[in-house]
Image: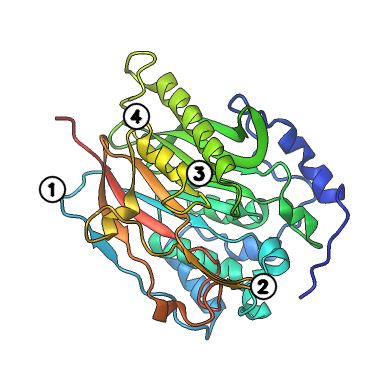
């Protein structure tokens, strides 16, 4: 399929200029306006139809709209037994690169995926169905290019508050008929958490601003009064850019350290704060890459939750993404949920679909809307000794 390219500097580029002007590489950012830009292509019929505040009813509507498609992946939670009692205040976190609509239809060339399976009219229901099936309290998404017209209004109706940070120069803008730039979005359930602080960060490499971003948010748990710092990011893709991903990861760790120090009760300059961290993202990095090692070795005391699925508790899953492009098949692990191992406990991890479930044409498909699988974990606050 030949991709049509529109000249840069069109309406979408101008429209989002104002958002990205505020991006600064050295400091947390002023938040973009929570109001949608004036001429986004709203999906009013869809949003009106989805003005449902009951997630069970909305899930039913999604399933009805999808009709006779193949069954959705049946995935089970593996419960991690540390011998402790049931968590008093579980924190369910979902990490997911949902595949930007413009990239799925335009630049990503999923050669085995039927074009009809990539239409937004189908995918929006599949994306919502996945979210509603697991109903996370904290939802971290990458490649979001339908924030204002779909995800934000629909999830706000279900009680989620959120923040979105677009990439300064999104590849989506190269695709004709795009819906604006893609970026990272962080949603949280307002019945469980209250907002404390937030920063949109343009990640730097050796003090040079890059095209990758992160949303960092400080939340307070309403039932325990404890604070939690959550970040979502999407690092630079493709081989050859390992050094850049490593630098971006270091920059993100620095921002996180600054934020937890600002809000923590520990001594100034102490790397370890009493505020637990959750860092979700598509790191575009396999576990042997330097950025992964940097996160493992960070003084923030982070560990990767999905290792808990392995027999020895120290190996990542075989894959979090599985796709076929003109260059060949790609089956690898690039997505992670990092957590503070001293202050948080992993209680359950959602397993990965099998090769048989995924099917010979891999992802995306009529069953699944993205080339990346969602990661879902249940955490709880560790009680202090």
**Vertical placement of residue 380 versus 205, above or below:** below
**Can you say whether 257 is above or below 366 in the image?**
above
Q: In the image, residue 347 lies at what x, y percent?
A: 24, 51
The residue carrying mark 2 is 119
- Tell me how far mark 1 sits from mark 2, CA to CA: 45 Å
| First in residue order: circle 4 vs circle 1 | 1
The residue under label 4 is 275
Q: CA distance from mark 2 to mark 3?
A: 26 Å
Answer with mark 1 or mark 2, whichever residue precedes in sequence: 1
Report, in whole angstroms, how far the alpha carbon at label 3 lies from the one at label 1.
30 Å
Residue drawn 88% across the image and 54% down it: 7
Mark linked to residue 232: 3
Number of residues whose C-alpha sits closer than 10 Å to that of mark 2, classed few (under 14), some (14–19) or many (20 or more): some
Viewer-side residue, 339 vs 109: 109
Per the model, the C-alpha gap separating discs 4 and 3 is 17 Å
Badge 1 marks a residue whose secondary structure is: loop
The label shown at residue 85 is: 1
Q: Position of residue 16 (x, y in %)?
A: 76, 43
- Residue farthest to the bottom? 68
Whole-angstrom CA distance, mark 4 to mark 1, is 22 Å
Left or right side of 121 for 13: right
Which tag, 4 or 2, sits closer to the chain's start? 2
Q: Viewer-proximal residue, 341 or 330?
A: 330
Which is in the foreground here, disc 2 or disc 3?
Answer: 3
Pick whichever of labels 3 and 1 is earlier in the sequence: 1
Alpha-carbon span between mark 4 and mark 2: 41 Å
Which numbered marker is on residue 107?
none
């Amino acid at each position: 399929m030949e991709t049509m390219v529109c000249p840069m500097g069109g309406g979408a580029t101008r429209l989002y200029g104002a958002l990205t002007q505020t991006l600064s590489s050295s400091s947390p950012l002023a938040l973009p306006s929570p109001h949608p830009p004036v001429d986004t292509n709203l999906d009013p019929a869809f949003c009106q139809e989805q003005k449902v505040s009951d997630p069970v009813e909305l899930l039913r509507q999604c399933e009805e709209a999808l009709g006779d498609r193949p069954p959705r992946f049946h995935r089970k939670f593996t419960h991690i037994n540390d011998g402790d009692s049931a968590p008093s205040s579980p924190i369910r976190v979902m990490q997911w690169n949902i595949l930007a609509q413009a990239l799925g239809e335009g630049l990503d060339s999923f050669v085995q995926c039927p074009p009809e399976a990539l239409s937004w009219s189908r995918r929006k229901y599949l994306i919502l169905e996945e979210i509603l099936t697991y109903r996370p309290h904290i939802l971290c998404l990458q490649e979001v290019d339908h924030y204002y017209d779909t995800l934000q209004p629909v999830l706000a109706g279900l009680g989620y508050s959120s923040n979105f940070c677009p990439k300064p120069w999104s590849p989506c803008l190269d695709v004709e008929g795009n819906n604006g730039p893609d970026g990272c979005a962080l949603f949280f359930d307002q019945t469980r958490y209250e907002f404390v602080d937030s920063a949109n960060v343009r990640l730097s490499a050796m003090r040079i601003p890059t095209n990758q971003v992160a949303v960092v948010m400080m939340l307070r748990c309403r039932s325990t009064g404890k604070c939690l710092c959550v970040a979502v990011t999407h690092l630079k893709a493709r081989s050859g850019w390992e050094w850049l991903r490593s630098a971006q990861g270091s920059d993100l760790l620095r921002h996180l350290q600054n934020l937890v120090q600002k809000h923590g009760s520990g001594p100034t300059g102490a790397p370890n704060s009493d505020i637990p961290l959750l860092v979700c993202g598509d790191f575009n990095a396999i576990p042997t890459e330097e950025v992964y090692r940097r996160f493992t070795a960070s003084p923030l005391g982070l560990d990767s939750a999905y290792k808990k699925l392995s027999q020895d508790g120290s190996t990542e899953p075989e894959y979090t993404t599985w796709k076929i492009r003109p260059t060949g098949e790609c089956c690898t692990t690039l997505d992670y949920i990092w957590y503070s191992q001293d202050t948080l406990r992993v209680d359950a991890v959602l397993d990965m679909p099998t090769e048989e479930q995924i099917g010979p044409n891999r992802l995306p498909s009529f069953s699944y809307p993205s080339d990346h699988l969602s990661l879902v974990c249940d955490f709880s606050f560790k009680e202090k000794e």
